Amino acid sequence: MWWKKNKWKVVVPVLIAAALAAAFYLGGDAPSLRGWSVKETAPAQTQSETTASATETAPETETRPPETETSAAAEETRQETAAGTTAAPETTARAETAAPEKVTQKAGSAVASRPGGTTGGMSAAEKESAAAAIAGETAASAAAQGSESYSEQQGMRLDPKTVRDKYQTEPVPEGKPVPVDPQGAVITDKACTCTISISCAAILDNMGWLVADKKELVPEDGWILKPMQTTFYEGESVFNVLLRTCKQQGIHMEYENTPVYNSAYIEGIHNLYEFDCGELSGWMYRVNDWFPNYGCSRYALKDGDTVAWVYTCDLGSDVGGGSVSGG
Amino acid sequence: MQNRDTFSGYHPIINFLFFGLVLVFSMCLTHPVCLAVSLSSALAYSLYLRGRRAARAALRYLLPMALLAAVINTAFSHEGETILAYLPSGNPLTLESVAYGLAAAAMLASVVTWFSCYNEVMTSDKFVYLFGRVIPALSLVLSMTLRFVPKFNAQIRVVSEAQRCVGRDASEGSVWRRAKNGVTILSIMITWSLENAIETADSMRSRGYGLPGRTAFSIYRFDDRDRAALGWLLFCGAYLVAGWIAGGLSWRYYPTMRGTALTAFPVSFLLAYLALCLTPVILNCREDRKWKRLTSAA
């Protein structure tokens, strides 16, 4: 009697919950978005000895508040995050994309593993240095973060409110070149050499996600263009070199100019386009092991640079540029 | 206007089913042979129905529109393995994007032509007859709207002729004079439309439209000829759908152009599609031959 009257009051919420669970599981249309766990992009190694070798990752700026913060609450959350994240070793260029262990770590275990333990507190300064040690913030990884002062010094004009320049580019880490707008670029006659390569190796791990028609396009070893030396003229950008190289080598390449970012956007190389391997896939470029956070038309090459174009299936996390694609 | 062709004389459901099938297949099958079949059949039927006028309209409007579609595709899509040349911007001009543009153009042209044939064959009363039971209110509104447009055109011709006789011509004089006369004619037409609507409404009410139990006379009978045609259309439709699901009519344009090999089965699908698209033309030609034989004998 009760069931007959209130059947729908039970069935409808169950159906809604089932639909939501299915949507959660299915996540998005990409290899790393399926499954039950909530994936966070892993920051650099928490063990300080292996940090030095993590040259390819820049830590997430959200999980690493600047060291100037001294409030206790900030320390605690940072410790918990740092201790709670299980290191997904990113020493190889093609790291595993599924790193679901973080969710299971609870605050309790983090508290117990604090240097001070559950008893005895630490002063603010002690906490700060302890957190820094745990997070392994050596000089190398600190440099990988964007540096406002350095960027402004080098000539980037940052909007004080959003801390970005007028083409939405974040500050560049210390030691890296700032973007050079192609409109003002002066190309001299001085010939220089650089190494360029194009690789779609990340697809080999995700062949199930690739559009069926394009399976025959992926080379066996993932190299569309093996690293080769090419000449360029001083003042040219990565885009100029890519365009010329593809034409000379007979490799198909399609791009589109994006005025908002004042750069060319590479949609596809060798008929492998963005989103062909899930909704997080596309082309990224790396110069001397750093993934610039601005378009390829704005990177002015220098003599001896190594340019690598890589296809990612996970917004960069599988090729070592996971922190670039924020914002 | 009633069309004198045999296919229009079949039961409306045959006409509707034929055009429905042909339009759906035209839009969904992208195999180049299918597109060519659809386009040529549509043009053939359109020529039969409308004669030379159709040919002229096709050349003047369809061809440029189709070519424009083809060119636009190559300007925006640069996918494809075979690079023919490099555009000034640096993007490649590929054979596959040209082919795809032509395919899209052919599809556009064939759909437009099929719709023009549909206009000739499916008059409003056939449409109302078919859907009057299913969507009575909407089909009544549709029939009133469809009836109104030609009436309006005829009346505006009458009014402007009359105005021309009085000297208030809208085709000569200064721009200002012409505009004034035009506005006068427009205001006359608005008054006429409103009054006509009221008259129509009164007439319809007096004849009992909208009353429950009102029947409508229809001249359409479903006879053996229609039964045979229905069977043929359903068979062709089912065969093509089966072929499509099985992949016999698949064709891809990017990254390279490739489709199923032309063995016996795929060829049979293409022949069935050709037969389906040419059904009205074949029926009409058969009747014409029979008629000619009868008249020349007598």
Image (spheres, rainbow, N blue to C red):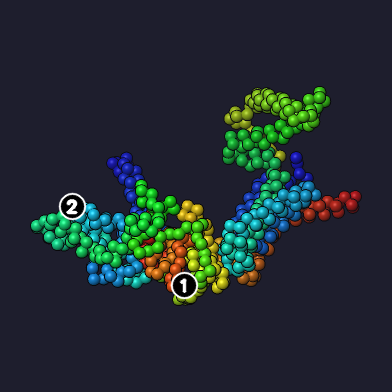
Q: Is residue A240 left or right of residue A316?
A: right
Residue B80, placed above or below residue A124? below
Disc 1 from disc 2: Cα separation: 49 Å
Which residue type does callout 1 highlight?
Cys
Residue at figure coordinates x 33%, y 56% from the top left? A149
- Evaluate whether label 1 is on the same chain as label 2: yes
Asked if residue A208 can be seen in this view, the reply is no
Check disc 2 and report the residue beneath it.
A72
What's the mark number on residue A306? Answer: none
Q: Are marks 1 and 2 in contact (CB under 8 Å)?
A: no
Check disc 1 and report the residue beneath it.
A194
Which residue type does callout 2 highlight?
Ala
The spot of residue B149 in percent (x, y) is 69, 34
Residue B155, placed above or below residue A43? above
Q: Say what secondary structure mark 2 lies in.
A: helix
* Crowd rating for badge 1 (residues with CA inside 10 Å; few <14, some 14–19, many 20+): some
Protein chain holding label 2: A
Residue at figure coordinates x 33%, y 46% from the top left? A13
Which one is in front, A323 or B194? Answer: A323
Residue B130 position by quadrant: top right
The spot of residue B152 in percent (x, y) is 71, 32
Q: Say what secondary structure mark 1 lies in.
A: strand
Which one is in front, B230 or A269? Answer: A269
